[in-house]
Amino acid sequence: MLAHHPAPPAQRFTPHLAEVVDAATLQNRLFQRRTSVYQKYHLLENIRKRSWLGPPSETIYGGISFSFENDDKQIGIALAIRDTVYFLDFCEHHFSIEQYEPSELGEVITQFIIDQLRTYEKDHLEKFFGIALPSLLVEKCPALCSRMWAELDIVPFVLDPHGPQNVEWVNMELWRTKTLDERAESIARKCITYFGPNQAPLLQVGFRGLVDVDAGSTAVLTSLSDYEKTVDECTWRAVMKYAADMKERNVKVAFFSSTPQGGGVALMRHALVRFSHALGTNIKWFVPRPRPGVFRITKNNHNILQGVAAPDQRLTDQHKRDLTDWILANANRYWFGKGGPLEPPEKGGADIIIIDDPQMPGLIPLIKKATPNRPVIYRSHIQIRSDLIDQPGSPQAECWQYFWESIRQADLFISHPVEAFVPSTVPKESVGYLPATTDWLDGLNKSMDDWDVGYYGRVFNGKCREIGMTTIDYPQDEYIVQVARFDPSKGIFDVLKSYAKFHDLIKDTPDVSIPKLLICGHGSVDDPDGALIYDSVIEYLSRDLAHLKSKICVIHIPPSDQILNVVLSKARIALQLSTREGFEVKVSEALHKGKPVIATKAGGIPLQVQHGKNGYLVEVSDTDAVAKHLYDLWTDHELYDRMSSYALHSVSDEVSTVGNTLSWLYLASSMSKGDKCKPHGRWINDMAREAAGEPYVCGENRLKRAVDVRPFGC
């Protein structure tokens, strides 16, 4: 290995070689590793065809170091490559500062690094998962991190030499003795520690249950300007107005939910905290320490309130005691103590508290007892069967009564935007509507090139082969998809029945290929039903649809957002046949990708689908109608193209992370001033836009206002 960029002369071990070492240091070095042509041959054929066949590429990681050289006339950049075991290769390049304008140098270095990473992947047929780099380099190249994430699907980790994630800066004397390439290799080793054995970044939760989103914001995926491009100007101006107010007054917001990953709540909170960090607002997210058996109880309650539990399923007195003990233990140990988020605001606690799911309303009376004047918002995100709650003695009435004793003490009741989801006991004046949302810049939704799509497709098929499941051999195979958790309310059996009827309709149609069906989704930490439902689906498939097993793939997706992104992006048509539903933002995610959606009139789904324009709405369990719409979309190419084109441009800012943040910032800004927020059944997004002086105008995309207190002239 060449010696590179030595330390200042006083700290060299071989000062008599200084001139020789300096000369070697300033030489550029290309990557030199060579891989076997034979080993690459079969994988290369699949990559050229954009095929999901064959094994996935090997995964690699990297580290970047830089230094000023030659009396600050040059900048040296070293890029080290390694896998989880070995140091594999490095390159080095030196840039003359005098050759570039100050504004140009960062762009030149950024483009150099992007080109080197892209070329290395293609030459070696390997997939970068993470790159670590020092914060000083990011200051010089502000677009580097977001470009690595957006263009190369690489997670960039920014290491602060004075932060807890430093490499060896704690011993600066030792660090200075390292050459530039040695520093890069040390940084690459640090990068690997952020990943688990499945190549997914490790989830990090602190002592008080504080969710350290993006490794405590060490993983820098996006910039503020990236978010600005995802929404209309009026939405962005409103967000910046409330963000400025919250930063000026240092308003602190704390979210509480049951789990840090899996399910829509966790996805939304990761995105919200990430965007909040970019804005500079103070929003934190806390989760309780889990306890065996509690999630079984909370899932039963979830099913009872949605009306999908067994008729004899009840919330027992013992279950109530278990839930109360769990909440009390977490609150007293982690949250009410010194430095905790539930301390009084004047002592550093949060100014606004948001209880983000039906597992934890027991916190509300504890908060109100300690700080009666601190605003507390409760968010309900499931399809509550208010009609069953109104029946005295029903399991739903008993379950709701238990929760309502706590929820009634909240200052605001936020619900998915369907009036029927709000029980009659909730005062109308305290009800506001807010849909579920998604992040257009995260791994679930961002655009990816054919190289990365092929990689994740091969990973997906590898998981299928591991369990003997039918594979999706894209691009030869076209397919229909439903992406959803394996949950009793997701209508998975209706999906299978609809596909079987569609198959009967199309099998005798000449010159038409028959698509496969893919049913897939992530699991959730607090959802013990997932494995039970999955096994029931496989049993049904083997028993009743054995003749179609080679056409149907049913699989739990590994914890990778990009795999879900890929299977939805390359599907022809998306289904969402839920029998009960809150909002299900997967519908908007599919529309955003230009996929016509066939969905049921359950929950908030009809607010997203414009029947006959970007998809079709059917009654719950109307599998005949689903099959007919599938047939029409599959055989009528003009119809498909028209719906696909409309879908691409029909999604509202309201279902984006920026739109969601707008609503929360508005509530936090106003309620932290002592304002009494009384929505009276209005959409929070509408209230936020109006209060910011940016009301909706004709022509803007908006979700249907199934519950709309007053018209807006459009």
Image: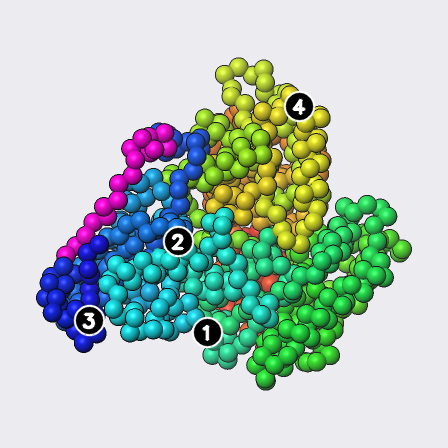
Which secondary structure, mark 2?
A: strand
Q: How is the image coloured?
A: rainbow
Q: Earlier in the sequence, mark 3 or mark 2?
A: 3
Q: Which residue is mark 1?
A: 244
Q: Which residue is mark 2?
A: 130
Question: How far from the left and from the top, in percent, is residue 428?
Answer: 73, 64
Q: Height in image: 518 above or below 182?
A: above
Residue stretch rendered in magenta on the structure: 26-43
- Looking at the image, is mark 3 or mark 2 nearer the viewer? 3
Q: Which residue is mark 3?
A: 12
Q: Check residue 546 in the rendering and tell me which mark sits there, or answer none.
A: 4
Q: Earlier in the sequence, mark 2 or mark 1?
A: 2
- Looking at the image, is mark 4 or mark 1 nearer the viewer? 4
> What's under tag 1, amino acid-wise?
Ala
Alpha carbon distance from label 3 to label 2:
32 Å
Whether residue 14 is visible here, answered yes or no, is yes
Alpha carbon distance from label 4 to label 2:
42 Å
